[in-house]
Amino acid sequence: MAAAADEYGGDSDKSRFRWLDAARYAVAAAVTVLILAVIVTAIKVLLRLDSLQISVDKGSIITIPMSPPEPEAALAFELQLRAQNPSGRVRMYYTNITAYLFDNRTSASASASASTNPGDDSVLYFKPKDIAVLQHEALDCSLHTNPAKKKMMDTFYFGMLYNGSRFSDMTLRLDGNLVTEVTSQLNKTRPTTYYCEQLLVGGNPNDDAFKYSQDVVCKQRRSAALP
């Protein structure tokens, strides 16, 4: 009887050890899954693409008629952009920019297809310089162009602005590539468009309409074809 009891007791001990081993393996597997989840989350946070924020100072674009000795009539267009990088991890670059100015009769997004040139529908278009912003920094950028009559600008608007007229509810569209520098070896690039709406264009910069106008925050749209 004693031998039988020992035999049964031995089987019971072996069974307990097997359950203990299974429990240890289960705990180890759960810990491994948890560690992997933490690593994946950390990588996602590191690689997450923050958005460069752009606004137009006082929501206005100044135009200044350029007098002779210019070879032909020209206008100086000047505006101040503020580009702010909200990320504390990465630098951001907005490159290969083309700017288009639209009136309130034409949708700024109407010429979105690759086969259509937005410049054909715009009042004015030009190529600003690239913008580079460090982590947690804001950069004030001066954009300007001097379009000559009938070359880069709609003739009607050129004449009106050259003679001192002012237009409201204009939209500035910025097409370019938003580059996020994750590391010195790894950059994320996305075609990105900004729409700066309800801008005041032309007139005298000393007018009250310009003095008391508010900054305009530009809306962003990334290419739908990219993840």
Image (cartoon, grey):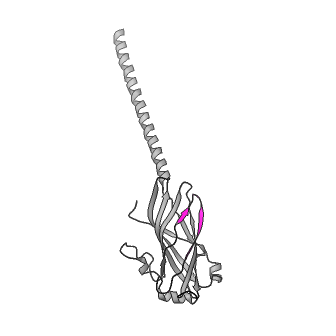
The quarter in which the C terminus is drawn is: bottom left
- The residue furthest top is 2
75 vs 89: above or below: below
Q: Is residue 69 left or right of residue 13?
A: right
Magenta-highlighted residues: 131-151
Where residue 54 appears, x then y in whole percent?
A: 54, 68
Total residue callouts: 0
The quarter in which the N terminus is drawn is: top left
- Closer to the camera, 151 or 171? 151
Where residue 79 appears, x then y in whole percent?
A: 57, 76
Q: Is residue 30 left or right of residue 89?
A: left
- Closer to the camera, 150 or 69? 69
- Closer to the camera, 70 or 201? 70
Is residue 178 located in the magenta-colored stretch of the structure? no
Where residue 153 appears, x then y in whole percent?
A: 48, 83
The residue at the point 46 percent across, 56 percent down is 187
Is residue 136 located in the magenta-colored stretch of the structure? yes
Whether residue 1 appears in this view of the structure is no
The residue at the point 39 percent across, 20 percent down is 13
- Closer to the camera, 25 or 107? 107
The residue at the point 56 percent across, 80 percent down is 77
Where residue 145 appears, x then y in whole percent?
A: 53, 78
88 vs 118: above or below: above
Whether residue 33 appears in this view of the structure is yes
